[in-house]
Amino acid sequence: MVNWVKDKTGRFPQRPHYEPSDLDFECEQIVNSFLKERHGAVVFPIVTDDLTVLIEGEADDLDLYADLSSEPGEVEGVTDFFPGKKPRVRISKTLSENPIMGNRLRTTLTHEFGHIRFHGFLYDAKTLTPSLFPVQEEPQSHKCKRENILNAGQYDWMEWQAGYVCGAVLMPISPLKEIARTYLKERAIATIPLVATSLEGRGLIRAVSSKFQVSEDAARVRLSKLSFLVGDESQMSRALFK
């Protein structure tokens, strides 16, 4: 269910508000359905080729080798929205051409998927009333810098939502919770959150990073947003793990 609120960024008169739990549920359903249809089973990590196919199913074109060097700042992904048409996604070639950048490529792909799936309808002139959203004839490009791919501030709702979707697609909520439960049970840890820099916190981050083929930074951000981790002991609250 989408709730509409005033868009303080000025992009639109109103913008969709999604609860994190709704994004978690929707993303898990998307991933499970896609993997079952494509492979007959839900197995993690999702391979990078599958992520490209997931995007290609919703985009008119996916360019994995785009030259984005002329864009100001460290832009790694761009989604071009066209009224009444599927969007176009461009990923910086610096990610696709360098095997070392594999995890950054995966997070950028899923971030752009977040824009397509949860924001694309905003630009579709066929589904919007002109009185609420003015029709744009020219493509509207949404440019995503590296600093906002994983953990944008909530003041930029589009980047925050796409960043949350990035984590929810790569690390769906149910298998992630199962990994956390197993990890905590094996160590007789009864309460969360853990301090991210503690021995136990670092161990949980590594377990999630390994299972889902994401960077430790991506795992830490996801676990923090779900209140499994906090930055330091001053933020601790004894929340019983359920």
Image (tube, grey):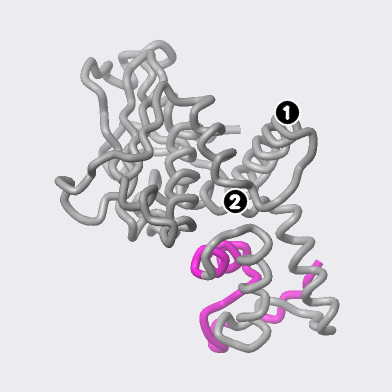
The quadrant in which the N terminus is found is: top right
Badge 1 element: helix
- Marks 2 and 1, Cα distance to the nearest angstrom? 17 Å
**Which mark sits nearer the N-terminus, 2 or 1?**
1
Looking at the image, residue 61 lies above or below residue 188 = above
**Badge number at residue 170:** 2
Q: Specify whether residue 220 is painted magenta.
A: yes
- Residue 236 location in percent, x, y? 61, 83
First to last magenta residue range = 217-242
Q: Quadrant of residue 131?
A: top left
Badge 2 element: helix
Look at 66% across and 80% down and name the residue there.
Answer: 203
Looking at the image, residue 132 lies above or below residue 7 = above
In front: 4, or 91? Answer: 91
Q: Which amino acid type is shown beneath numbered disc 1?
A: Glu
Q: Which residue is mark 1?
A: 37
Which is in the foreground here, disc 2 or disc 1? 1
Q: Specify whether residue 210 is painted magenta.
A: no
Look at 84% across and 84% down and name the residue there.
Answer: 188
